[in-house]
C-alpha cells in the first residue's frame, strides 16, 4: 500500500549537520558580521517553552524572521547531559 | 532550521557546536568595541568548549594578544587548550595563581559554573576588559561586586 505522499515536496532531504561540518564552514569574521547585522536588523518573532521538573526539563525556543527564515532550538536538560551529549552523526568536538 | 521557501525542516544542527561559536562571538563582538586595541594579555577561565571558543575569538579580534593565561579548577583539563594556542605560535601558560593572573590581564574572559567569585575587583587593573559568560543561574557568580562597581 502506498502512502500517497507528495513526492516532489518530500524529495528534499533533511540534512544532519555535524560539529565538524559547522567548524569547516564558519569563520570568526563571518559570524561576527552576521551577529552585527542581526543586532541592527529586524527583531524576530519568538517564544520559549520550558517544561518538566527539577529532575528533568525540556526547553524549546522557536523564532521566525520574516523574509529570512525560521528555526527551533531544543535542549534536553539533565545533569548527565554535561558528560554524555550525543553527537550528531559521527562528529567530534569542534577544535575551537 | 526551516526552509524559507517550502517551510519544511531543512536541517538539524549540532547544538553545542553552534552554541560555543555563537556565545564566543557575542563576547567578541562587544569586546571589539569595548576592549583596548593594544591588549596584550588574555586570561581565560574554564576548560569547556565555550572557553576554548572564547580564546579563539579573542585572538581573532585582538591580534595584539601576545600571551594567553589559562585557569581551571582542574588544570589537567587545559592541556588540549594549551596545545591549541601553542600551535598558533602564541605564548601560553596554565596558571595556578589566579589572583596574580587577574592582576596581569588586559582581557579576562570567564566560562565557568562558579558559585563563589573567582575575579576580585581590587586586583583588576584599570582598563581591563572583563567578560563574564558562565553564570546562568542566580546562585552563580564569577566576579565579585567590586569588579562591577569599578567598571568605567
Image (spheres, coloured by chain):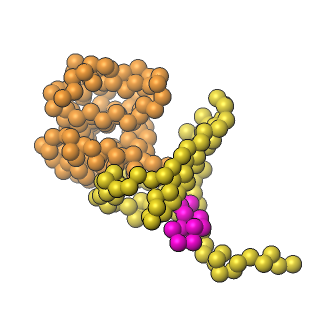
The residue under the point 67% across, 35% down is: A52
Q: Quadrant of residue A4?
A: bottom right
In the displayed orientation, state which residue is furthest to the right: A1
Q: Quadrant of residue A76?
A: top right
Task: Describe residue B21's horizontal placement relative to residue A93 as left or right.
Answer: left
Q: How many numbered dots are placed on residues in this image? A: 0
Task: Describe residue B115's horizontal placement relative to residue A30 as left or right.
Answer: right
- The answer to which of A86 and B37 lies nearer the viewer is B37
The residue under the point 38% across, 36% down is: B133
- The answer to which of B29 and B43 lies nearer the viewer is B29
Chain painted in orange in the figure: B
Read off the magenta span.
B1-15
Q: Position of residue B10 (x, y in %)?
A: 56, 67
On whether residue B5 falls in the magenta region, the answer is yes
The residue under the point 48% across, 52% down is: A45
Q: Position of residue B40 (x, y in %)?
A: 16, 41
| Chief SS of the magenta region | loop
Q: Position of residue B67 (x, y in %)?
A: 21, 41
Is residue A64 shown above or below A3? above
Instruction: Look at the image and tell me in which quarter the C terminus of chain B lies.
Output: top left
The residue under the point 21% across, 23% down is: B150
On whether residue B4 falls in the magenta region, the answer is yes
Q: Chain A shown in which color?
A: yellow
In the displayed orientation, state which residue is furthest to the left: B38
Q: Position of residue A38 (x, y in %)?
A: 35, 55
**Can residue A90 be seen in this snapshot?**
no
**Can residue B140 be seen in this snapshot?**
yes
Amino acid at each position: 500500500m502506498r502512502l500517497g505522499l507528495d513526492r516532489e515536496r518530500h524529495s528534499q532531504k533533511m540534512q544532519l549537520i555535524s560539529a565538524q561540518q559547522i567548524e569547516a564552514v564558519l569563520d570568526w569574521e563571518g559570524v561576527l558580521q552576521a551577529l552585527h547585522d542581526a543586532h541592527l536588523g529586524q527583531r524576530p518573532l519568538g517564544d520559549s517553552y520550558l517544561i518538566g521538573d527539577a529532575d528533568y526539563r525540556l526547553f524549546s525556543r522557536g523564532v521566525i524572521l520574516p523574509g529570512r527564515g525560521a528555526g527551533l532550538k531544543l535542549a534536553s536538560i539533565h545533569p548527565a547531559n554535561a558528560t554524555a551529549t550525543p553527537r550528531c552523526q559521527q562528529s567530534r568536538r569542534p577544535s575551537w | 532550521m526551516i526552509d524559507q521557501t517550502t517551510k519544511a525542516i531543512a536541517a538539524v544542527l549540532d547544538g553545542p557546536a553552534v552554541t560555543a561559536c555563537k556565545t564566543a562571538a557575542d563576547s567578541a563582538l562587544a569586546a571589539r568595541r569595548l576592549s583596548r586595541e593594544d591588549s596584550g594579555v588574555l586570561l581565560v577561565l574554564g576548560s569547556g568548549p565555550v572557553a576554548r571558543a572564547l580564546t579563539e575569538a579573542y585572538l581573532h579580534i585582538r591580534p595584539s594578544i601576545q600571551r594567553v593565561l589559562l585557569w581551571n579548577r582542574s588544570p589537567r583539563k587545559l592541556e588540549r587548550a594549551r596545545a591549541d594556542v601553542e600551535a598558533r605560535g602564541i605564548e601560553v601558560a596554565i596558571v595556578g595563581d589566579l589572583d596574580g593572573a587577574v592582576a596581569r590581564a588586559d582581557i579576562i574572559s570567564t566560562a565557568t559554573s562558579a558559585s563563589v567569585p573567582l575575579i576580585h575587583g581590587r586586583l583588576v587593573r584599570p582598563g581591563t576588559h572583563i567578560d563574564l559568560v558562565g553564570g546562568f543561574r542566580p546562585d552563580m557568580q564569577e566576579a565579585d561586586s567590586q569588579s562591577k562597581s569599578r567598571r568605567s
